[in-house]
């Protein structure tokens, strides 16, 4: 059974940092494109960033580019989302997701492309 489990969320002041983690079990980690999404109250789930299967390519939403960094550790079957200079607009539930896209260098941005999802972790940024 495939499971994606996020951790690392919490409450932080504006300008602060957080690192989210997502551990994958039940499937070969390297077979996944890994994405991070977020959903704020009353809004649709949106793409934050993603990392290709081989780790050689990343893609970020314009709203987080330069502030957030995604990385993956194959030995730990974990993908990370390092977030810097957080603002209240970053407040949301953050989800990791796995895309079974069979191409090593691509990252997709649409939620429908992702096959497996974590349960989400809350990030709250106070002003």
Image (tube, grey):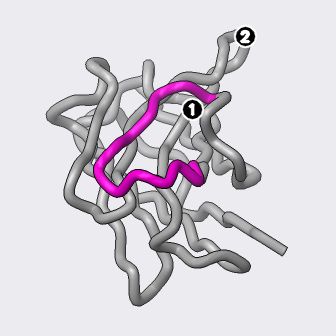
Q: Which residue is mark 2?
A: 42
Taking the image as shown, residue 105 lies to the left or right of residue 7, namely left
Residue extending farthest to the left is 66
| Residue shown at 29% from the left, 50% from the top | 105
Residue 104: within the magenta? yes
Q: Position of residue 17 (x, y in %)?
A: 31, 49
Circle 1: element type = strand
Q: Which residue is mark 1?
A: 38
Front in this rendered view, residue 56 or 5: 56
Q: Quadrant of the N terminus?
A: bottom right
Q: Chief secondary structure of the magenta span?
A: loop
Q: Position of residue 36 (x, y in %)?
A: 49, 43
State the CA–CA distance, disc 1 to disc 2. 12 Å
Front in this rendered view, residue 33 or 91: 33
Q: Quadrant of residue 123?
A: top right
Q: Position of residue 54 (x, y in %)?
A: 30, 65
**Does 112 sit above or below residue 28?**
above
Q: Quadrant of the C terminus?
A: top left
**Does 36 sit above or below residue 72?**
above
Give the extent of the magenta segment. Answer: 99-111
Taking the image as shown, residue 71 lies to the left or right of residue 123, namely left
């Amino acid at each position: 059974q495939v499971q994606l489990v996020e951790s690392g969320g919490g409450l932080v002041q504006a300008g602060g940092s957080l690192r989210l983690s997502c551990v994958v079990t039940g499937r070969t980690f390297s077979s996944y494109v890994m994405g991070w999404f977020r959903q704020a109250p009353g809004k649709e789930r949106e793409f934050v960033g993603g990392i290709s299967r081989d780790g050689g390519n990343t893609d970020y939403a314009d709203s987080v580019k330069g502030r957030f960094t995604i990385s993956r550790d194959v030995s730990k079957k974990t993908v990370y989302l390092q977030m810097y200079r957080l603002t209240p607009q970053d407040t949301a539930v953050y989800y990791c997701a796995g895309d079974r896209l069979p191409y090593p260098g691509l990252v997709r941005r649409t939620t429908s492309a992702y096959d497996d999802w974590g349960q989400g972790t809350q990030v709250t940024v106070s002003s």
